[in-house]
Amino acid sequence: MQPFRFNLEHVLSWNRKLVEVEESRFQSLYASLRQVQVGIAELKAERLAVEQGVVRKANPSAQDLAALGPYRIRVTARDRDLGIEQRRRQQLLDEQRDKLVALQRRVKLLEKLRDRRLEEYTYSMDKELEAIAAEAYMARLIGESHA
């Protein structure tokens, strides 16, 4: 009897390593996206604080009001840029997720194939052992009948 051997074991192992690499890349892209999202939230909080600071003053100076316009323009431009970057990073993350899911499916398929082959191997080994046991029993019966 030969021990069980799955011919595609090296392929399965390689795909598992690829999944690990792609999971790491996914985590990195996710962290990158979160960084931009935090930047957007911080920018909005800063904008709100500055505008409320000017509005809450009893008598805002003309200089404060004059500075608020260009500030809003810069913040709006920065917010637009961060929004563009967020969408770009989200797209990269979505593509990476698709790639990772495809690799995970491939690994699962190979594992199912290996399990099915192991079941077939176990079944054939059980049949072989059964046949050997039957032959041994018959040989013993024949040996006892001649004695």
Image (cartoon, helix red, strand yellow):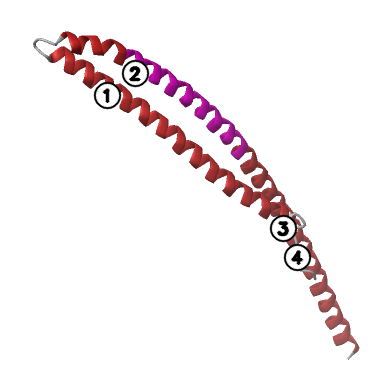
Where is mark 2, residue-wise? Answer: 75
Q: Residue at x 68, y 49 (%)?
A: 112
Amino acid type indicated by mark 2: Val
Above or below, 82 against 138 in this view is above
Placement of the N terminus among the 4 image quadrants: bottom right
Where is mark 4, residue-wise? Answer: 126
Q: First in sequence, mark 2 or 3: give its number.
A: 2
Amino acid type indicated by mark 1: Glu
Q: First in sequence, mark 4 or 3: give its number.
A: 3
Whether the residues at callouts 4 and 3 have beta carbons within 8 Å, the answer is no
Q: Residue at x 64, y 46 (%)?
A: 108
Q: For this rendering, which residue is in front, 80 or 23?
A: 80
Q: Where's residue 128, x and y in %? A: 81, 67
Residue 9 quadrant? bottom right
Q: Nearer the viewer, mark 3 or mark 1?
A: 1
Q: Residue at x 68, y 45 (%)?
A: 109
Q: First in sequence, mark 2 or 1: give its number.
A: 1
Where is mark 1, residue-wise? Answer: 46
Amino acid type indicated by mark 3: Leu
Q: Where's residue 106, x and y in %? A: 67, 43
What segment is highlighted magenta in the picture? 72-100
Name, please, the residue furthest toward the right. Answer: 146
Q: Residue at x 50, y 29 (%)?
A: 89
Q: First in sequence, mark 1 or 4: give its number.
A: 1
* Structural distance between the alpha carbons of marks 1 and 4: 73 Å
On the question of residue 119 being in view, the answer is no
Amino acid type indicated by mark 4: Asp
